[in-house]
Image (cartoon, rainbow, N blue to C red):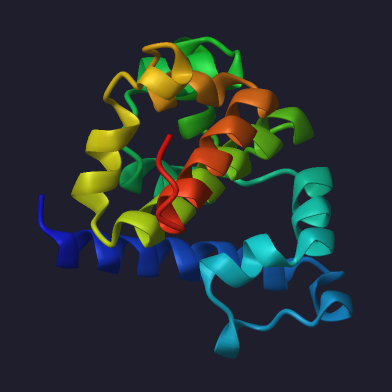
Amino acid sequence: MNYKKHTSDFDVVNEAINNYAISLNSASIFNFNKDNNSFSDFFDNKMLVIQVIKKGLPYKVFNVIKKIIPFTEDDWANYLNISKKSLQRYSNDKNHLFKPIHTEKIIEIAEVTNYGKDVFDSTEQFYLWLNTPSFIFNNLKPAELLQDSYGKELVLEELSRIEHGIFA
């Protein structure tokens, strides 16, 4: 994998999520504008994240996110608790908005990915870590824990420990 390619992929995600957030009428209320915000800034703005979740994420933004995260169509269907066939149907509807429950899960996974790439300074190293069984997680892969909010929190906590050099 080419790190520069993944950095530019994250730039595409930044642009997609920024454009969508700005298109929401409430975005200006939450001091969010395209010129000086990154994907990380979006996650830091919890009120805006809530608004996006309530409104639903368009499939086209999900598709941009999906391209930078190393999960298969089956993985995404599993994480979102919907059928692969539904995901394929959504891809054909240019105006499809995910339900809030699905939007929240997509944003959670994107948040973990964004943080993980920052912690590891390498997209490849983060993806390797994400897919390697870990003693701290009872030999589960961190990616396997992303199916629910509690697991996501455990993964974020472990990433924070790694970032601060605290190893169990």
Q: Residue 70 appears at what percent x and percent y?
A: 30, 35
Q: Quadrant of the C terminus?
A: top left
Q: Residue at x 50, y 39 (%)?
A: 158
Q: Which residue occupies the foreground of this view, 74 or 160?
A: 160
Q: How many marks?
A: 0
Vertical comparison of 103 with 161: above or below: above
Vertical comparison of 102 with 141: above or below: below
Q: Residue 47 appears at what percent x and percent y?
A: 84, 61
Q: Residue at x 75, y 29 (%)?
A: 101
- Res 103 visible: yes
* Res 132 → quadrant: top left
**Left or right relative to 131: residue 86:** right
Residue projecting furthest to the left: 1
Q: Residue at x 78, y 60 (%)?
A: 46
**Left or right relative to 59: residue 150:** right
- Res 60 visible: no
**Left or right relative to 38: residue 3:** left
* Res 154 → quadrant: top right
Vertical comparison of 15 with 9: above or below: below
Q: Residue 129 appears at what percent x and percent y?
A: 29, 35
* Res 148 → quadrant: top right
Q: Residue at x 62, y 72 (%)?
A: 41
**Left or right relative to 4: residue 166:** right
Vertical comparison of 117 with 66: above or below: below
Q: Residue 105 appears at what percent x and percent y?
A: 63, 33
